[in-house]
Amino acid sequence: MTKTSYHFGMIGLGVMGRNLLLNMADHGFSVIGFDKDTTKGQALESAATPGTVVKGVATLKEMLDQLERPRRMMMLVPAGQPVDDVIAELIPLLDKDDIVIDGGNSHYTDTERRLKYMAEKGFHFMGVGVSGGEQGARTGPSIMPGGDKDAYEKVAPVLVAVSAKVNGDPCVDYLGTGAAGHYVKMVHNGIEYAIMQLISECYALLKLGAGYSNDQLHEVFKTWNEGDMKSFLVEITADVFIKKDDLTGNSLVDMILDKAGAKGTGKWTSQDALDLPTPIPVIDTAVTLRTISSLKDERIEASKLYPAGSTHISDNNLVQLVHDALHFGTMISYVQGMAQLQLASSEWKMEIPLEKVVRVWRGGCIIRSVLLEPFYQVYTANPTLSNLLLDSRIASMVAPVIANTRLAIQKGIAAGIPVSGLAAALSYFDAYKSANLPTNLIQAQRDYFGAHTYQRIDRPGIFHSEWQPQ
């Protein structure tokens, strides 16, 4: 093998980096990887499929020296300063037209900055979102590239080969200029937060409200995953309920502390939505509830001051009510995320093709769902649609589950079971479909105390009134 024979390089050989590189090798590409921890390079070679060309090296220079020109490489390192540190190490080793990909969960503003910096030095740079977890990286993830389009054309053969496939279509496509790839991945993760929160609330309604056992919950979610809510998150939820704890023999889910972790991408989605602005209250609520979950000691003390009454929910139709509420809330989560992408694309001139986004999300990623197929059809017909709720096909999916959603939320509230994600979805929907909102009173109050002015319903212009009695 010649010194410059490797097609693709990987910087960072953690589980994701290693599995993605092995995936590339399985598709006929010769690959080379670097990690400061030399044992990870050895683990990469040991895990390679027999007959594939895979190499781990101990220095960055050693990796670059053995890549074919122009060199194609991806970083899969923690977001933030580590990415800048790797770039600083790379700069003296790169040649003009080399392609550097950031495949981690970087904030899109950092990606914009790095794009400009690398372009000024004559190098190609791309921000690429990768979703699917360690298993997806190994067998086929959803890949969300953005930025340098010329660079994308050169790396597309590799990304297409390793991506998930749905009906033969690769779950990867060029998703826009600048930091579009990382912006799309950020919103993807925000939707992921939302759906996970909704599922947890439905779990609480059935377990706390109706006393369902974990075996019963497994059957419920397994059945749901065979119908109109078939999705990765519903599928794995069914699996969770039958996993036993090796230490106690109990159901593992019952032994897990109710404090959720977070890596920040959900929060970024909420923060950017506020700045745009665009309303995404289900995602906002999901972020907030993870924060509340971290207050475990305070929650225990509060539970002593405010003891719960009866949480029992009596309704022979409860499973159907909860199914419809989850179906509704999940659709609204996608609605809000896609509306954010549409507005951000316009505001930041990212040229994000929404039909390609939902097509890429149909397979490989954490939020893959049968719901994405009708969304794909809608955006293919109307790529500039501002909100999915404005499409008659989506309205025909939403309308049948509204009544049961209201009943499920009512029962949760009456039983003292927190269902704030579901309630946020319903409140957003009710507000969005209201031709008239009580905001006229807010405008009157603002003008009263701060002379902020208002508009009228009967004539154009900006008005101010003296509100205090003379």
Image (cartoon, helix red, strand yellow):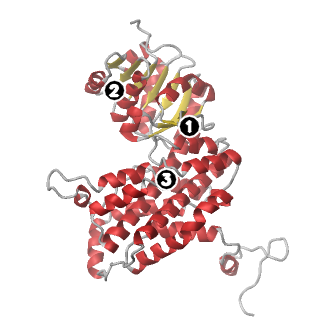
Image location of residue 198, percent across then percent down: 44, 62
Name the amino acid type tagged 2.
Answer: Asp
Q: CA distance from mark 3 to mark 2?
A: 30 Å
Q: Quadrant of the N terminus?
A: top left
**In percent of the image, x 54 and y 58: which residue is there?**
331
Q: Secondary structure at mark 1?
A: helix
- Name the residue carrying label 3: 190
Name the amino acid type tagged 3.
Answer: Gly
Q: Quadrant of residue 458?
A: bottom right
Name the amino acid type tagged 1.
Answer: Arg
Q: How many marks?
A: 3
Nearer to us: label 1 or label 3: 3
Q: Residues within 10 Å of mark 3 (few under 14, many from 20)?
A: many
**In percent of the image, x 25 and y 26: which residue is there?**
39
- Name the residue carrying label 2: 35
Q: In this rendering, does residue 231 appear at all? A: yes
